[in-house]
């Protein structure tokens, strides 16, 4: 029993139940409108053709009713009530046409909404793709700039290294010349001391 109550609670809480209740309420109100339309508009037109005031009165009498002298019904009449059938069919056709029109309008609105949704989604995807392309281009540009800066830095470092090596080479050459000069002076002094 508890399980049944829980299932009933879930059933009641679902949105479809509320939608169904609204649908039933609208349908009963719409049925009242259709009945009023049939009685107020269709019935008078048929009454003009048949001479009866209501569609319900249209019937084929198979066996008429039998009355006694007091006017009481002894045997009820047997009749085919085709007027009620016609009225029900008219009501059905009006409701069917109205529902068809509502469904067509709802389908058109849904189709339009889906088209707009797809268009928005497409624009969003396109914008995302463009954004991604811009980010990718910016990333490539930043990498190229960083690579160029690294190359320029390496070239500067190479020039500094070359200048340092050239300076060291000049210094070594100067030291070799000085050393050679000092050796020559030493040899001259040595030779000068030997001659004296």
Image (cartoon, rainbow, N blue to C red):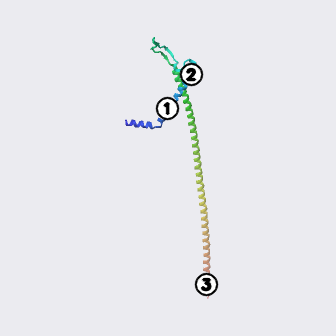
Judging by the rendered image, the residue that carries numbered circle 1 is 25
Q: Which label's residue is closer to the chain start, 3 or 2?
A: 2
Q: Nearer the viewer, mark 3 or mark 1?
A: 1
Residue 172 appears left or right of 80: right
Q: Between 48 and 196, which is closer to the camera in this rendering?
A: 48
**Residue 76 drawn at (x, y percent):** 46, 15
Residue at the front extreme?
Answer: 70
Residue at the top extreme?
Answer: 69
Image quadrant in which the N terminus is located: top left
Crowd tier of the residue under label 2, counting other residues whose Cα lies within 10 Å: few below 14, some 14–19, many 20 or above: some
Q: Is residue 162 above or below residue 92?
A: below
Q: How many marks?
A: 3
Residue at position x 61%, y 77% in the image: 178
Judging by the rendered image, the residue that carries numbered circle 3 is 189
Q: Disc 3 vs disc 1: Cβ atoms closer than 8 Å? A: no
Q: Disc 3 vs disc 2: Cβ atoms closer than 8 Å? A: no
Residue at position x 56%, y 23% in the image: 42
Residue 44's disc number: 2
């Amino acid at each position: 029993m508890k399980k049944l109550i829980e299932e009933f609670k879930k059933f009641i809480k679902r949105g479809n139940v509320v939608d169904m209740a609204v649908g039933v309420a609208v349908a009963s109100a719409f049925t009242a409108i259709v009945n009023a339309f049939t009685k107020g508009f269709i019935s008078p037109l048929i009454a003009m053709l048949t001479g009866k005031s209501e569609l319900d009165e249209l019937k084929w009498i198979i066996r008429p009713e039998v009355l006694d002298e007091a006017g009481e019904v002894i045997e009820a009449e047997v009749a085919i009530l085709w007027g009620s059938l016609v009225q029900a069919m008219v009501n059905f056709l009006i409701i069917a046409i109205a529902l068809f029109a509502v469904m067509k309008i709802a389908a058109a609105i849904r189709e339009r909404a889906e088209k707009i949704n797809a268009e928005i989604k497409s624009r969003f995807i396109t914008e995302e793709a463009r954004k991604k392309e811009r980010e990718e281009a910016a990333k490539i540009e930043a990498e190229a700039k960083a690579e160029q800066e690294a190359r320029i830095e390496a070239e500067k470092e190479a020039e500094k290294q070359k200048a340092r090596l050239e300076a060291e080479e000049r210094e070594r050459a100067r030291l070799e010349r000085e050393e050679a000069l000092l050796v020559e002076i030493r040899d001259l002094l040595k030779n000068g001391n030997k001659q004296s």
